[in-house]
Amino acid sequence: MANVRINTLVILVFLPLVFSNLADASGFIRKAGPLPAVFNVLKFGAVPNGREDCSEAFVQAWNAACHHPGGNAMLVVPPGNYMLLPAVFQGPCTGEVVVQVQGKVTGSDDVSEYSENQWILFENINGLVLTGGGIFNGNGADTWQYNDCATNPSCQPLAAGLRFSNVNKGTIGPLTSLNPQGYHMSLDRCHDFQINGVHINAAKTSPYTDGVHISGSTNVGISGSIIATGGNCISAGEGSTGVSVTKVTCGTRACPNAKACITSF
């Protein structure tokens, strides 16, 4: 019995270390305190084969994490390729939610699947961390031919890859965004929002694939990131204040400050 107690103790001590190392390796440093409740998308039916739509499983996992009693929840997307049709992750939540994407999330190349102007939407959330070093591939190269905004003033913009609406205290990165239909990231009415360690990439010929588009938002910081895309590096609309940019590379050009990096309209 003594040996059993010792082995159990070793396991109990070792498990938190494994969890901590996993989080640290993916770029998210867990705050001191009790371990968060973990909601793994695989347990909600997600299939990481890159073919089956996993949007329902992702949303169910989000809802469980978002409404976990007392907050302190983490949604985990393990390694693998997850096909995701347009999905909305809504708050308010009971506390901060950490979304740790370790795998690859892939969108559809069929524009008819997108009834709204976003692929993935996070909205009405107070406290969001999107991290893990994973990849969001919007699979939008075949849809760029349908973007006629250069000649049509009343055009319908193609879907933004990651859209954040009314998100306060948001932290994004590290992660990679590839080939969305429209903007890579769109921030609308977001406050106290930090983007750090993101890699954004689309072909130079991709139209209106702005790296980060900001509107009606305050205290937005973008740092330590590489943005190489066919649209603007960072664009800001009316009503956006307190936007800072540090250590950002736009294509092959280093941006020393916000004035040098941001296109305003």
Image: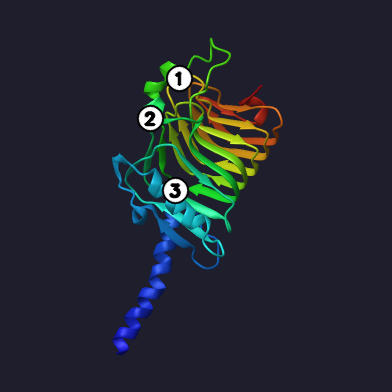
**Residue 117, placed above or below residue 3:** above
Question: How is the rendered protein coloured?
Answer: rainbow
**Screen quadrant of the N terminus:** bottom left
Front: mark 1 or 3: 3
In primary-sequence order, the first of circles 1 and 2 is 2
The residue positioned 45% from the left and 35% from the top of the image is 177
Tell how many labels: 3
**Residue 129, placed above or below residue 115:** below
State if disc 2 and disc 3 touch (CB < 8 Å).
no
- Residue 14 image-quadrant placement: bottom left
Q: CA distance from mark 1 to mark 3?
A: 33 Å
State if disc 3 and disc 1 touch (CB < 8 Å).
no
Residue placed under numbered mark 3 in the picture: 59
Q: CA distance from mark 3 to mark 2?
A: 20 Å
The residue positioned 38% from the left and 79% from the top of the image is 9
In primary-sequence order, the first of circles 3 and 2 is 3
Q: Position of residue 116 (x, y in %)?
A: 50, 31
- Residue 253 image-quadrant placement: top right
Circle 3 SS class: helix
In primary-sequence order, the first of circles 1 and 3 is 3
- Residue 51 image-quadrant placement: top left
Q: CA distance from mark 1 to mark 2?
A: 15 Å
Residue placed under numbered mark 1 in the picture: 204
Amino acid type indicated by mark 1? Lys
**Residue 242, placed above or below residue 155:** below
Circle 1 SS class: loop
209 sits to left or right of 44: right
**Residue 83, placed above or below residue 18:** above
Q: Position of residue 81 (x, y in %)?
A: 32, 42
Residue placed under numbered mark 2 in the picture: 139
Q: Position of residue 97 (x, y in %)?
A: 53, 54
Looking at this view, is 252 or 79 the one in front?
79
